[in-house]
Amino acid sequence: MTLEALAKVGISTEGLRSKAWDEFAVPGAPKMHFILTVCDNTAGEACPVWPSQPMTAHWGIEDPAAVNGPAFKQRAAFNDALRYLRSRIGAFINLPIASIDRMALNSKLEGIGAMDGTTTKSSPVS
C-alpha cells in the first residue's frame, strides 16, 4: 500500500530500495547531515553513533501498516502518513539552514516533529 500511495501522487520509487542503517556507517558511505526517524518502533531505541555526528530528530507518525480493518481504512492510513510526511518534509526544506545555529536548528527540527499527525512517543535523539 506504500507503493500504491506514492504512485497515486506521482512519486516514483524506481531504483529505490529500503536500506539498513549500517549501510551508512561504513567507510566511504555518504556523509549524513540529518537523521530523521519516523517509526515509533525506533523511538525508544538508542540510535547508532553516526560518522560526522549528524543532527537527529524523531518525527513520529503512526505506522500505517499496523492498521487493522478493511482495505479502505488501511489505504486511508497510508495516505494520512504520506500527507504528514510531505508536510514535514516541506517545512524541513524551507528551513533557513545556512543562517541559523545548531541549537536553533535542533529546535526547529523538534517543532517539525510535533506537527499535525505526530504520535506521543518520544525519542532519545536530539
Image (cartoon, rainbow, N blue to C red):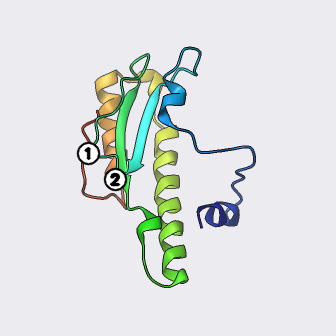
Q: Is residue 102 above or below residue 81?
A: above
The tag on residue 40 is: 2
Measured along the vertical axis of the image, is residue 122 above or below residue 68? above
> In the displayed structure, would residue 54 be above or below residue 1?
above
Q: Amino acid at mark 2?
A: Asp
Residue occupying image coordinates x 31% and y 41%: 110
Q: Which mark is residue 90?
A: none
Residue 125, image quadrant:
top left
Q: What is the CA distance from the residue labelled 1 to the residue labelled 2?
A: 8 Å
The x, y position of residue 106, in whole percent, is 32, 31
Q: Which residue is located at x 45 percent, y 83 percent?
A: 69
Residue located 45% across and 49% down the image: 88
Q: Which residue does the numbered mark 1 point to in the structure image?
A: 44
Q: Secondary structure at mark 1?
A: loop
Query: Mark 2 and mark 1 in contact (Cβ < 8 Å)?
Result: no
As rendered, which of 11 and 73 lies closer to the eye?
A: 73
Tag 2 secondary structure: loop
Amino acid type, label 1 = Gly
Which image quadrant: the N terminus? bottom right
